[in-house]
Amino acid sequence: MKFLADENFPLKSLYRLREAGLDVKAVIEESPGIKDREVLAWAADEGRILLTFDRDYGELIYRRGLSAPTGVIYFRFIPETPEEAAKYLLKLIEISGLRLEGRFTVVERDRVRQRLLP
């Protein structure tokens, strides 16, 4: 799996994911300030799952009909530490039978919900 971390994704989580061996590119490192539409296109073009704390992507994909990336993981909480998002993603990856590709995944502290991407 390949990931693209949105600009709001904590850098310490980004580094932790890379240390764990994941292929993660980051908007903040390569193209800070680009628009959400461009982030979606980038993730789609490179076959990456988007990691974000921004709920606007659901609106762009489901209501405005923009092309979806391989997957979206929306962290729907304010992290208590900069490493918390990485901790949750690493746990998600280990869940047997959970597919992140082709899904809009909403991660809350106490539950995970998924919806198929169009």
Image (cartoon, grey):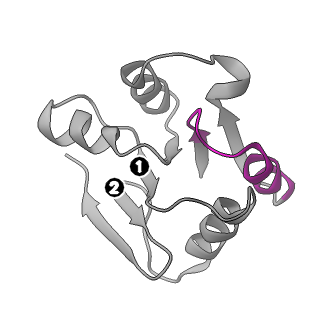
Above or below, 38 against 76 in this view is above
Residue at 33% across, 57% down: 103
**From which residue to which does the magenta span run?**
4-19
Q: Give the amino acid type for the residue marked by disc 2 in the picture.
A: Phe
Q: Residues within 10 Å of mark 2 (few under 14, many from 20)?
A: many
Question: Mark on residue 104?
Answer: 2
Density class for disc 1 (Cα within 10 Å; few <14, some 14-19, many ≥20) is many
Which residue: 73% across, 24% down?
29
Q: Secondary structure at mark 2?
A: strand
Q: Quadrant of residue 88?
A: bottom right
Residue 60: x %, y % from top left: 24, 33
Task: Tell whether label 2 touches label 1 (CB within 8 Å).
Answer: yes
Q: Is residue 74 left or right of residue 56?
A: right
Please determine whether, in this image, residue 89 is positioned above or below residue 46. below
Q: Position of residue 3 (x, y in %)?
A: 59, 44
- Disc assigned to residue 71: 1
Name which residue type carries label 1: Gly
Whether the magenta-drawn stretch holds residue 16 is answered as yes
Where disc 1 sits, the SS reads strand
Count every numbered label the image shows and give the total.
2
**Sooner in the amino-acid sequence: mark 1 or mark 2:** 1
Residue 46 lies, in percent from the top left, at 52, 30
Residue at 69 percent of width and 19 percent of height: 30
Which residue is pictured at 67% across the width and 33% down the height? 26
Looking at the image, the residue that sits furthest to the right is 19
Whole-percent x, y for residue 38 in the image: 43, 19
Report the Cα–Cα distance between label 1 and label 2.
6 Å
